[in-house]
Image: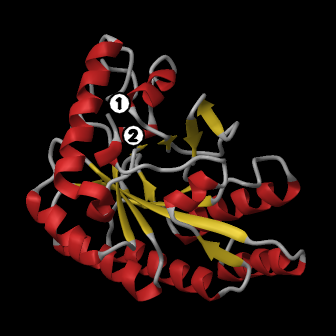
């Protein structure tokens, strides 16, 4: 069974090969300050790890904006769809940005979400889209740059660095949660397996080695075991000389693009 020594051994291999294991961290479903949210910010600050915070624009509060402003540049708000509302019909998988509605209707919602993000967070918010449930209809993806989005983040290794012309893809690869019943923390072995699989595949070239390995957390859904795992993971990664944490701006920049503030999006 995979354990922490396997992670250290993999990172040691990166160090021996003289390469940097770039890592980034995304947390989804931010709406308002809560004890769980404070715990999240505390981990980011204590380990000095930048956090991309996926905020639900239609539900986000002014109190959340005020708290993020105090947190400073270590936290970057990004847009998590619009209202995190499922529009799929059973038995289809949940999706907000799907084909169940006309594309112009979905784009209008995303534009309203951009305006809300800019109003709440100003220049802190970046033109970076995280679809709810990590799903977006393929026909919508080429429309995102026209709305001003420069980057898209879903789940699992990206096939190419750009999802569409002018749109960088930067995904996550380790989801701490098990969403099938009973919902809860995925478990140490499963979570470590996910991270190790991406790191190893980056080294052997079976996935894009330039894509940072992405940690995905959901602060509102974590139990104490999930928090303990995340705390230990960040500590180990931060302490290892082969690991370099990157911001979302860094991750997008490696693909030759920038992440403009939403204030600058037309």
* Image side of residue 224 versus residue 199, left or right: left
- Do callouts 2 and 1 mark residues in contact (Cβ within 8 Å)? yes
- What secondary structure is found at the residue carrying circle 2? helix
In the picture of the structure, the residue carrying the numbered disc 1 is: 94
The foreground one among 117 and 175 is 117
Name the side, left or right, on which 62 lies relative to 264: left
Disc 2/disc 1 C-alpha distance (Å): 7 Å
Earlier sequence position, callout 2 versus callout 1: 1
- Which residue does the image show at 63% across and 36% down from the upper left? 162
Residue 135 is drawn in which quadrant? top left
Q: Secondary structure at mark 1?
A: loop
- Can you identify the residue that label 2 sits on? 133
Residue 241 placement (x, y as % from top left): 71, 86
Q: Residue furthest top?
A: 102
Direction from residue 7 to residue 150 in the image, left or right: left
- Residue 1 visible: no
Q: Nearer the viewer, residue 264 or 219?
A: 264
Q: Whole-percent x and y of residue 213?
A: 63, 60
Instruction: Decide: is 50 above or below 170.
Output: below
Q: Is residue 82 left or right of residue 189?
A: left
Task: Identify the disc placed on residue 32.
Answer: none
């Amino acid at each position: 069974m995979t354990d922490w020594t396997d992670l250290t051994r993999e990172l040691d291999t990166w160090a021996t090969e003289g390469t940097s294991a770039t890592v980034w961290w995304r947390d989804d479903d931010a709406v308002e300050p809560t004890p769980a949210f404070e715990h999240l910010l505390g981990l980011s600050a204590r380990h000095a790890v930048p956090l991309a915070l996926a905020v639900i624009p239609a539900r986000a509060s002014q109190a959340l904006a005020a708290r993020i402003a105090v947190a400073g540049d270590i936290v970057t708000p990004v847009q998590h769809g619009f209202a995190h509302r499922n529009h799929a019909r059973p038995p289809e998988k949940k999706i907000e940005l799907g084909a169940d509605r006309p594309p112009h209707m979905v784009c209008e919602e995303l534009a309203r979400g951009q305006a809300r993000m800019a109003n709440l967070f100003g220049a802190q918010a970046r033109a970076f889209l995280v679809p709810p449930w990590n799903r977006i209809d393929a026909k919508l993806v080429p429309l995102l740059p026209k709305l001003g989005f420069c980057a898209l983040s879903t789940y699992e290794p990206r096939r190419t660095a750009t999802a569409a012309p002018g749109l960088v893809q930067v995904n996550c690869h380790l989801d701490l949660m098990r969403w099938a019943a009973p919902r809860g923390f995925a478990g140490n072995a499963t979570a470590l397996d996910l991270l190790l699989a991406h790191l190893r595949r980056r080294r052997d070239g079976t996935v894009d080695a330039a894509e940072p390995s992405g940690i995905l957390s959901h602060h509102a859904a974590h139990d104490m075991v999930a928090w303990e795992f995340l705390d230990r993971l960040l500590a180990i990664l931060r302490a290892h000389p082969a690991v370099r944490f990157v911001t979302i701006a860094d991750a997008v920049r490696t693909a030759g693009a920038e992440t403009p503030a939403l204030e600058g999006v037309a």
